[in-house]
């Protein structure tokens, strides 16, 4: 069964969601155990965050080339940042242990801001690099008004 997601902003929307759940349950051919989860809504990372993240990766790659003679792609920088700052996810599939880093595409805006703050601090501390904080771009990406 396809998951259903409802954003509850008003009482009317909450009532509609409860009604929809009842309709779904009644439409099932047999008794099926269902799960209903209610949590605070958090939007996925924003386009502004994504743009700034990739701009920072390019800036880091350029800095490493200019200061250390190391040439790295934006993708390699992305892999390093994920390895450094994102948790490892582990799953067992048919007895095989599979490990992978969480995808930045799956981060919500709050978690993405925290990830980017870690990158910013790491660059300053470990590379002596001050990343671009063009006011409007940075503020849009970090949700600062």
Image (tube, rainbow, N blue to C red):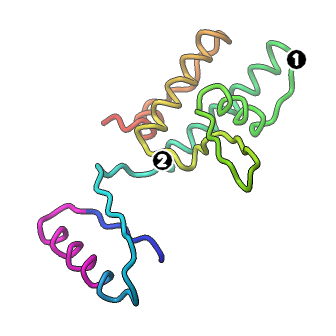
Q: Is residue 13 magenta?
A: yes
Question: Who's the residue at 29% across and 49% down the image?
Answer: 40
Q: Nearer the viewer, residue 138 or 107?
A: 107
Residue 125 vertical position relative to residue 77 in the rendered view, above or below: above
In the visual, does 15 lie left or right of 94?
left
Question: Who's the residue at 83% across and 30% down the image?
Answer: 72
In the visual, does 38 lie left or right of 14?
right
Disc nearest the viewer among 1 and 2? 2
Is disc 1 placed on a helix, strand or loop? Answer: loop
Residue 142 drawn at (x, y percent)? 42, 35
Residue 126 drawn at (x, y percent)? 65, 10
Q: Nearer the viewer, residue 61 or 106?
A: 106
Question: Who's the residue at 24% across and 80% down the image?
Answer: 22
Q: Where on the picture, by quarter, is residue 103? A: top right
Residue 6 drawn at (x, y percent)? 31, 67
Tally the numbered discs: 2
* Labels 1 & 2 near each other (Cβ < 8 A): no
Residue under numbered circle 1: 69
Q: Where on the picture, by quarter, is residue 122? A: top right
Range of the magenta residues?
Answer: 8-23
Residue 116 drawn at (x, y percent)? 53, 30
Is disc 2 placed on a helix, strand or loop? Answer: loop
Mark 1, residues whose alpha carbon is within 10 Å: few (<14), some, or many (≥20)? few
Residue 99 vertical position relative to residue 128 in the rendered view, above or below: below
Q: Is residue 34 magenta?
A: no
Q: Where on the picture, by quarter, is residue 56? A: top right
Question: Who's the residue at 60% across and 42% down the image?
Answer: 102
Distance (Cα) linking label 1 and label 2: 33 Å
The label on residue 103 is none
Residue under numbered circle 2: 45
In the visual, does 46 lie left or right of 87?
left
Residue 25 vertical position relative to residue 50 in the rendered view, above or below: below
């Amino acid at each position: 069964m396809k998951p259903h997601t409802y954003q509850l902003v008003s009482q009317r929307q909450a009532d509609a969601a409860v009604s929809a759940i009842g309709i779904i349950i009644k439409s099932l051919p047999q008794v099926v155990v269902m799960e209903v989860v209610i949590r605070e809504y958090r939007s996925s990372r924003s386009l502004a965050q994504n743009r700034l993240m990739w701009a920072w990766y390019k800036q880091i790659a350029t800095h490493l080339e200019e200061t250390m003679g190391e040439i790295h792609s934006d993708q390699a920088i992305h892999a390093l940042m994920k390895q450094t700052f994102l948790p490892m996810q582990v799953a067992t599939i048919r007895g095989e242990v599979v490990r992978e880093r969480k995808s930045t595409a799956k981060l919500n805006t709050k978690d993405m801001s925290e990830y980017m703050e870690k990158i910013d601090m790491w660059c300053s501390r470990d590379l002596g690099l001050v990343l671009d904080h063009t006011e409007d771009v940075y503020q849009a990406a970090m949700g600062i008004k």
